[in-house]
Image (tube, rainbow, N blue to C red):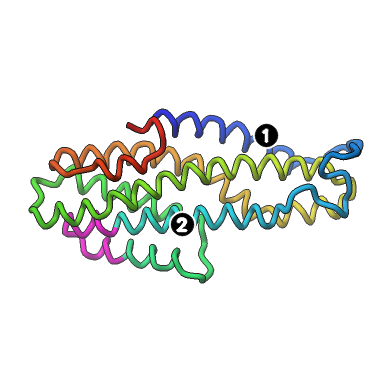
Amino acid sequence: MKILNIKLFTFITTFLFSFSIMSVALPEVPKLPGFGGGSDDSPAVDLPSAQANLEATMREALANLNKAESHFQKALGNSEAAAAAESRADTLSSDGDVDLNSALETTASARKAGAEAESKAGELSAEAKQEYVKGLLPYAQGVALTVKVSDQAKSWIDAAQGEMKSLRNPMKLNKLRKSLAGGMKIAKAIPDFLKTLGTSSKGVFSFAKSQKMDTSNAEKEMPADEF
């Protein structure tokens, strides 16, 4: 999973540097004419909107991954786990409030449990194979969106870092830190989630191929260098 490993290293490096900036007081920096962030009253980047986009992409990725997990679990005969995954997918696809960090943890745990079930599964029936195949495309789309989220998160962290450097008013800086707390919490969870996906992607497609399923359409949706 070369692309996930590269993105994971880049993301962790960027996040740790940015987090250190959020945790300490920043010195005043000169304002540069014509360069974004030159005024406390004129933010260089619409950070709330960028954070909302980050959350929306993560939410869509998780919805796809849970939709896929529902099909996988149905194929394996685990109706309870399938129903739980389907419920999570429906919630994530709705307009209601969602704890994305909790959803990240639950999605990762569900895939680990699914991988364990797959390792113990024998030859699936023709009907079960058809059900499993239904999950491959949304799974691949979920992986691709998660990689996109990691790119968005890096850009967002860079923008947040630049905005905080531009603020000279301690009260405004503290207010900005609080407003970014949700996005930073999600960003902090992404590296471990990417690591989980890097492992689970190998497992999902290896299992499908061992069962002689057609994975070609789903593989086309996976990020570059995955196959």
The local crowd at label 2, few if under 14, some if 14 to 19, many if 20 or more residues have their Cα within 10 Å, is some
* Residue 49 rendering spot, x and y as whole percentages: 67, 57
SS category of the residue bearing label 2? helix
Residue kind at label 1, given as amino acid type: Phe
> What residue is pinned by disc 1?
17
The local crowd at label 1, few if under 14, some if 14 to 19, many if 20 or more residues have their Cα within 10 Å, is few
Identify the main secondary structure in magenta.
helix
Indicate which disc residue 38 carries.
Answer: none
Whether residue 28 appears in magenta in the rendering, the answer is no
From the image, state whether disc 2 or disc 1 is nearer to you.
Answer: 2
Taking the spot 38% from the left edge, 63% from the top edge, the residue there is 89
Q: Could you say which quadrant of the image residue 36 lies in?
A: top right
Q: Could you tell whether 166 is left or right of 150 in the image?
A: right
Q: Which residues are magenta?
A: 70-83
> What residue is pinned by disc 2?
60
Q: Nearer the viewer, residue 186 or 94?
A: 94
Kindly indicate whether the residue at mark 1 contacts the one at mark 2 (C-beta within 8 angstroms).
Answer: no
Name above or below for residue 192 compared with residue 102.
above
Residue kind at label 2, given as amino acid type: Glu
Q: Name which of mark 2 and mark 1 comes first in the sequence.
A: 1
Q: Could you tell whether 135 is left or right of 103 in the image?
A: left
* Residue 213 rendering spot, x and y as whole percentages: 16, 44
Q: Could you tell whether 21 is left or right of 213 in the image?
A: right
Whether residue 78 appears in magenta in the rendering, the answer is yes
Q: Quadrant of the N terminus?
A: top left
